[in-house]
Amino acid sequence: MSHSTDPRPMSAVPGAKLTGTAEVPGDKSVSHRSLIFGAMAVGETQVTGLLEGQDVLDTAKAMEALGAEVIRHGPGEWSVHGVGVGGFSEPEDVIDCGNSGTGVRLLMGTVATHGFSTTFTGDASLRSRPMGRVTDPLALFGAEAHGRAGGRLPLTLVGAANPVPVRYATPVPSAQVKSAVLLAGLNAPGETVVEEIEATRDHTERMLRGFGAEVEVDGRTIVLKGQPELTPQHIVVPRDPSSAAFPVCAALLCEGSDVLVPGIGLNPTRAGLYTTLREMGADLTYENERLEGGEPVADLRARFGPMKGIEVPPERAASMIDEYPILSVVAAMAEGTTVMRGVKELRVKESDRIDAMARGLEACGVRVEETEDTFTVHGTGGEVPGGATVGTRLDHRIAMSFFCLGLGARRAVKIDDATVVETSFPNFLPLMESLGASFRRENG
Ligand code: S3P
């Protein structure tokens, strides 16, 4: 479903002292994959802790349009009755992936090796994002894409009726591209091989193995054996480290705060922000470290304290790619300069996130510099003036980042549209309020 509700401007009120426990929702990446892989298994997959954000709800609808049965039993409790690898049928209508790059790119991979046509669209943000990075490798399987200029949505993908397996070296570090190729490979005979330019989040490899596929990983090379029978699973979705970043960072920024964020997955392909925050001197500890479903998990404890600017190395970018907006906010409140290198992928996210953060931070009185691939924020040592209105550009992470800045700034920060947080963190505002934050509804 495309974003159609009226924009809701809101301000974050400064002076919050955040305390208590923040139970953040399920992981977005794992939630999408639970529904898609469940739909490709034979029989019923059960999912506990599914993120009920708009992105994932759109993927649930898409799986139904392709022939799977998806049922909600209660909050976070879902089941998917899968049709087996190769068992999808042609959707009768356009598939609208709303705001979700992960949804549309994984689904394109899925249908690329089914002999029917699927037309995809999305909201204004998604329609502006590049799809050639996925349709190019899918063409190697025999799929044909007919989209707008630059491979933009709406786009029709004519799937290959007789797909061939593919060997593909990814030109950009992208788990979505890797996953699209592996998903297409599921319904191709023989071995599909992806060589990654850099290691990215590995949920697809881990979860497909859990469903019974043969997936070998050797360094950055992934080999998938096509046409497996996937066995239904009971998936317990871990809490999302990318969503946890917001209450964690807000606590680090707001004087007197002490917040516990329990049960956060710290898979090394996702945990780069937390390493960075600790290097900045954040009072951030991992409590009750354990393994859950084979993944490292901890309760994160974040307390207010001074932080200093650092250089964030380019090789860390993939493991914290969604966290640069909130890191920029932390950098603005820290002492000294933070330089983020190797971040040009941020320019093709839900918005151009370097530009969105740069303009918003400048409006709030923070000095920044940017090149195509680098973002530099000059910290204020806790003295961000605020008092500005920031454009969220249909981007949930931009909205939540500026909400956090507003809580720690001198004057309120107004966001032009709070509804965008529905994408990944539907209970963001009430959860932050339960910790002691206050937000004010504004007139447009
Ligand atoms: C995701 C991959 C990343 C990330 C997105 C989720 C995934 O995108 O930004 O939020 O679940 O595979 P890219 O693959 O474009 O880096």
Image (cartoon, grey):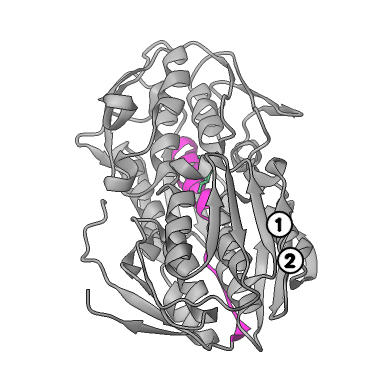
Q: Does the magenta segment cover residue 23?
A: yes
User: In terms of depth relative to the viewer, which is nearer, 298 or 337?
Assistant: 337
Q: Is residue 88 above or below residue 245?
A: above
Residue at image point 72% right, 52% down: 311
Q: Which residue is mark 1?
A: 266
> Residue 249 at what x, y percent from top left?
61, 71
First along the sequence among labels 2 and 1: 1
User: In terms of depth relative to the viewer, which is nearer, 55 or 61?
Assistant: 55
Task: Residue type at mark 2: give it.
Answer: Ala
In this orientation, does residue 240 appear? no
Mark 1 and mark 2 in contact (Cβ < 8 Å)?
yes
Q: Is residue 126 left or right of residue 222?
A: left
Q: Magenta stretch?
A: 18-42
Q: Is residue 309 above or below residue 409?
A: above
How crowded pointer 2 is (Cα within 10 Å; few <14, some 14-19, many 20+) is rated as some
User: In terms of depth relative to the viewer, which is nearer, 61 or 404?
Assistant: 404
> Residue 187 at what x, y percent from top left?
48, 22
Asked whether mark 1 lies closer than 8 Å to ligand 1, one says no
Q: Does the magenta segment cover residue 327?
A: no
Q: Which residue is mark 2?
A: 298
Image quarter of residue 343: top right
Task: Residue type at mark 1: give it.
Answer: Leu
